[in-house]
Amino acid sequence: MISTSDFRRGAKILFRDEPYSVIEFQHVKPGKGGAFVRTKMKNMITGLVHEETFRSGEKFHNPDLQYHDMQYLYEDNGLYHFMDQDSYEQVALNKNKIEDVLSFLKEQTTYTVLYFGERIIGVNAPTFMELEVKETPPGFKGDTAQGAGNKPATLETGLVVQVPLFVTEGDIVKVDTRESTYVERVKK
């Protein structure tokens, strides 16, 4: 059971028989009457965000969420095929189930698939991924690792990130998937 006093950003609760993730919360203690908690939360199935007010100390069940490591295999006719690393069972997901990780899809990479009961409700990319730079404008003479300035680079998945001027086509770069930002160039 999760109490409103245990709310944190990202806390998962079962509300009206559906899993929700807490985005923001605020404990309010008015001068008159009981304390309450104003909460902004996201439905993990539909993706809809709404605000709700709860009495202080109200309790909620933990949602029955399971995380499975699945390897991305290939895309075929708009379906994206993943294989469970433990049972070798394959599932095909449509674009709206994986839109959060679409710009990070790379074959033979392991992703975390979130289940609510028997139903897939989301896919999470690894926190950091190493991707090859496919296209970027050339750097200038004198560009160094300490140089200031950035330029756009298109990666092998189609994602465009800002990279330092010394990065060239063919380089492998480490990308933070939470923010879609460049972290560092990886030595080959």
Image: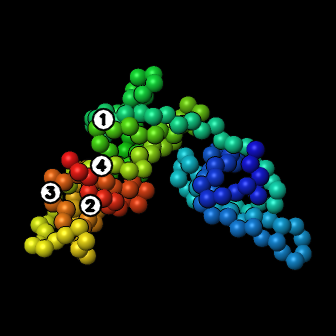
In this image, 137 relative to 1: left or right?
left
Closer to the chain start, of discs 1 and 2, is 1
Q: Residue 160 has which mark?
A: 2
Disc 1 element: loop
Q: Is residue 120 above or below residue 54?
A: above
Please state which amino acid type lies under the numbered disc 1.
Gln
Farthest-out residue, right = 32
Q: Quickly name the residue at label 4.
A: 130
Closer to the chain start, of discs 4 and 1, is 1
Disc 3 element: loop
Q: Are marks 4 and 3 in contact (CB under 8 Å)?
A: no
Q: Are marks 1 and 2 in contact (CB under 8 Å)?
A: no
Q: Residue 169 has which mark?
A: 3
Q: Nearer the viewer, residue 117 or 157?
A: 157
- The residue lying at 79 percent from left, 50 percent from top is 59
Disc 2 element: strand
Mark-to-mark CA distance, 4 and 1: 13 Å
- Which is closer to the viewer, label 4 or label 2? 4
Mark-to-mark CA distance, 3 and 2: 13 Å
Closer to the chain start, of discs 3 and 2, is 2
- The residue lying at 45 percent from left, 22 percent from top is 87
Q: Residue 108 has which mark?
A: 1
In this image, 31 relative to 142: left or right?
right
Quadrant housing residue 73: top left
